[in-house]
Image (cartoon, grey):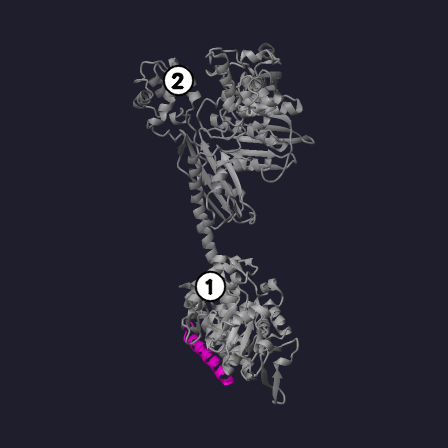
Amino acid sequence: MKTSANASVKNAAKLSQLDLFGAGGMEASKKSAPQKPAKAGEAPRQRAASARTAGGSRTRGARKEPLPGKRTARKIVASHSEPDLLDTAAEPTPPIAAGVVSPAPASTAGKVARRESAESMGARQREISVSEFFTKNRHLLGFDNPAKSLLTATKEAVDNSLDACEEAGILPALEIVIEELEEERFRLTVTDNGPGIVKNQIPKIFGKLLYGSKFHALKQSRGQQGIGISAAGMYSQLTTGKPVQIISRTGKGKPAHHYEIAIDTAKNAPQTVKEGIVEWDRDHGTRVSMDLSGVYKKGRRSLDDYVGQTALANPHAEIFYRSPKGEEFRYERIVNELPKEPLSIRPHPYGVELGILMRMMKESRGRSVAGALQSDFSRVSAKVAMEICEAAGLGPGTKTKPGRLTPAEVERLFKAIPKVRIMSPPTNCLSPIGAEMIEGGMKKSIAADFYASSTRAPAVYRGNPFQIEVGLAHGGQLPADELIDLWRFANRVPLQYQQSACAITRSVITTDWKKYGLQQSRGALPAGPMVLFVHIASVWVPFTSESKEAVATYPEIVKEIRLGLQECGRRLGMFLSRRRRLAEEEKKKSYIEQYIPHIGIALREILGFSAREEAKVVSRLKDTLERSRTI
Amino acid sequence: MAQTTVRKIRDRAEDVHRKILKGQKPSMKFPLRSLSNVKYDPKAGYFEMRGRKKVRTLTVSTVKTFAQTLRMMALSKELVEQDDIATKREAYYVSKNWDAARFLEQPESDAVMDDVEALFEINREQLGFVPEEKGGEIAGRLIILDRDSETKKTLRIDCTKFGSGAYSIPISVEHLQFETDAKFILAIETAGMFQRLVKHGYWKQAGCVLVSMGGVPTRACRRFVRRLADFKKIPVYVFVDGDPYGISNIYRTLKVGSGNAAHLNEFFCVPQATFLGITPQDIVDYKLPTHPLKDVDIKRARDAIKNDPFFQHHRPWQKAMNHLLDMGVRAEQQALAKHGLNYVIERYLPEKLAHTERFLP
């Protein structure tokens, strides 16, 4: 039962609508048609055929049986890599598909002993909470190994702090302190000077998954779904059993609240272990502290690197960091000005998914379909809304209420969108770091000979505006005979893992660096003393997974990154060729010094003239060559 | 002779000296040493230079080679004046005393030496440089008249009396005289095949002189065969491996000379040579065991058909080379041993020599 259930999970995409009975149904079909042993994928179709021929009844879809709730779990497992995972998981189980087929015909049913009845199975079927699911699948959130877990937890806390400060218009000052409590056990404490959190919200923010302000807004921010910090807390609880500690104060004269929060994974609800008011030396801000098991390492992809790169991508932030080994790093603020505030935009029709469109129509406050399109999407004018409705065969769309649309009508609407020309979404909602800032930061943290940077004009993928920035440092102390160091950033957050799966890496690999004087093997990063900085800012960065480690390869994104890389690459190429030319000149000069005396010696040996004549020949010849060299 | 060489060297050096004092960049003209600068006239019978020259002007980037060329000329003048000689290897070591102008590897010094040789259009022996290489070996119906280096008395060297050994061709052969009743000269690529023919006294039954070339024939070997063949007006038959190297490097160089030292080909060639085997057709006729052509073989053969004036001139050779390429195989002289060790003596050579008119040109 278990193995065949797993097999059907693999084929879930194909089977989810048909194979609702797992092994039981399959076995029955095998018995009924023994001459043709059925493969897993064929079973349902065969069963459908036999059902029709044996019974002669045309009952397809008529006999709706209660859907086993187990389906929900299967669906979640099967859709590991789908970006809209949470969305699907959060939504109620979809209605039964129309094509459900009855199990084996009655003639054979008597011979096969049923192992379970629908009722006995039903008794074990229950809802799975999202937090419970993630407890078992923590790798999806970036907690798959101890070194990475420590980094991910830090990253989530830092992301939250920076987002909060910027949203409130406060220049961020962060303190990241990691203490080693015992072997492979650490205490992570992140303190910010942000606006603080109101008392009632504290438990929910830190103790409930999928609770946050950012998921429903299309706006450039570090966090997206409201999973991060609570998932970190959950990981902490899972590995140490300790609750998360929070202190937060919203302003001078207000009390500093202290909370100890555990997460009830079954209910996806916070459990307040302890709460109270404490003395705190800060006017406003939040401190989150948690114990967790992990591993601290040095080198590439280390925590130290992460903090350094975060400081680089956030020149307006002041960051103090104490590593588990007690080393202290202080990253000064480079610019005393907050970055331009990113604006929240409505989604663009080109980027919407069918499921989301259905929900938007259902929840819209618009009076008509056309009105809803106009008010809930960006760049949809009355004219465009009408064109969409007409292309969908809904008339001008001014009469129908959006909530009344049938699923089939929404689908027609969905299919009509690409047929209509719609202006690109506004791009002024993005807040890039700035080429000067990137270059300045790199100059401060990397000892190199050459720096370049560029900020591309905003572009659009699938209705989402995005902007690419590239920075480059070459030469100096950087290791010359290794592959280059690629630093990837998304919305100012350094991406440390899954480098090879990332659109940024792909773009670097598919750029021809030999043109710019670097070495590069086929299908690899270029080699040479270089650090490459690539930043993508977007209202919705298309990550390949919830752990937000790699950017999905949309052609528009790859194209923009490559253009940015080429811009910096060209400047590097010019620098390198000029340097090579100078070296060549230098070499030529030394050639003259080295070899001309030998011409003098040889001529003297052959012609037998005096040493004075020899000196004359040498100096005359040097003059001639020096002169010609500069022309 | 020695004075001409010294004068040529002085003339060239004076020209350079004069230009330097005038504030001009001195230059030297070298004949281009490559196949592209030779032409083949079957009446002359050897590769002649087309006269294309490369001019090496003293600039920043040529200053090193220029200095080395001049120093090599100075070394040559010294050798000639003192009636001494230096091997290529020795010349290379002499350069180690030239500080920055020294050669790092011998091929560098060899190239400069070849340049100097071509520059003056004389034989490198006349410049005091002698090759290291062995000249080749002789056995058969031939008496060589040489001189004793001390007594200056004539020495009669009878090449029939070396038993299982052979006579070594000296580096310089111009002074040798010959006495022979041989009907032809058989030039052989490998020492192994030569050994077999000597051991079984093949030269007695065939009435010939056997020459072991040991790969591409040296200048001395080419000159020796040429003088002997001219002297007695006897034909030269060449017996090499049936592969592009045997054909285009060994046979072609023996017959018409090389592209590298084209100014000397007039003396160092054997226009009367013809090709006995192993021909591509022999591979078929004698069902010889083969090996596949290597990439270098294929390249060599294509290059010969496309760029070598000798092969371009002779249609039969183009057909033969294409035949070889089509088969994609090569056969060594020793492959005849498949039919028995002495098959080459008893059947192959007699059969081939019965129809010398069929030999490839």
Range covered by the magenta-colored residues: B1-25
- C-alpha gap between disc 2 and disc 1: 78 Å
- In what element is the residue under mark 2? helix
Q: Is residue A179 left or right of residue A85?
A: right
Q: Residue A221, image x and y in percent? A: 47, 28
* Residue A181, placed above or below residue B87: above
Q: Is residue A629 left or right of residue B93?
A: left
Q: Residue B139, image x and y in percent? A: 60, 77
Front residue of this view, candidates B310 and A447:
B310
The amino acid on which the numbered mark 1 sits, given as a three-letter code, is Ala
Residue identified by numbered label 2: A408
Q: Residue A469, image x and y in percent? A: 45, 38
What label does residue A434 carry, if any? Answer: none
Disc 2 crowd rating (10 Å Cα; few below 14, some 14-19, many 20+) is: few
**In terms of secondary structure, what is the magenta stretch mainly?**
helix
Q: Identify the chain of the residue marked 1, using the numbered disc in the image.
A: B
* Residues marked 2 and 1, same chain: no
The part of the image, by quadrant, that contains residue A341 is top left
- In what element is the residue under mark 1? helix
* Residue A560, placed above or below residue B8: above
Q: Which of marks 2 and 1 is in front?
A: 1
The part of the image, by quadrant, that contains residue A453 is top left
Disc 1 crowd rating (10 Å Cα; few below 14, some 14-19, many 20+) is: some
Residue A394 visible in the snapshot: yes
The amino acid on which the numbered mark 2 sits, given as a three-letter code, is Ala
Q: Is residue B33 left or right of residue A33?
A: left
Q: Identify the chain of the residue marked 2, using the numbered disc in the image.
A: A
Q: Residue A89, image x and y in percent? A: 52, 20
Residue B101 visible in the snapshot: no
* Residue B323, placed above or below residue A471: below
Residue identified by numbered label 1: B320
Front residue of this view, candidates B27 and A480:
B27
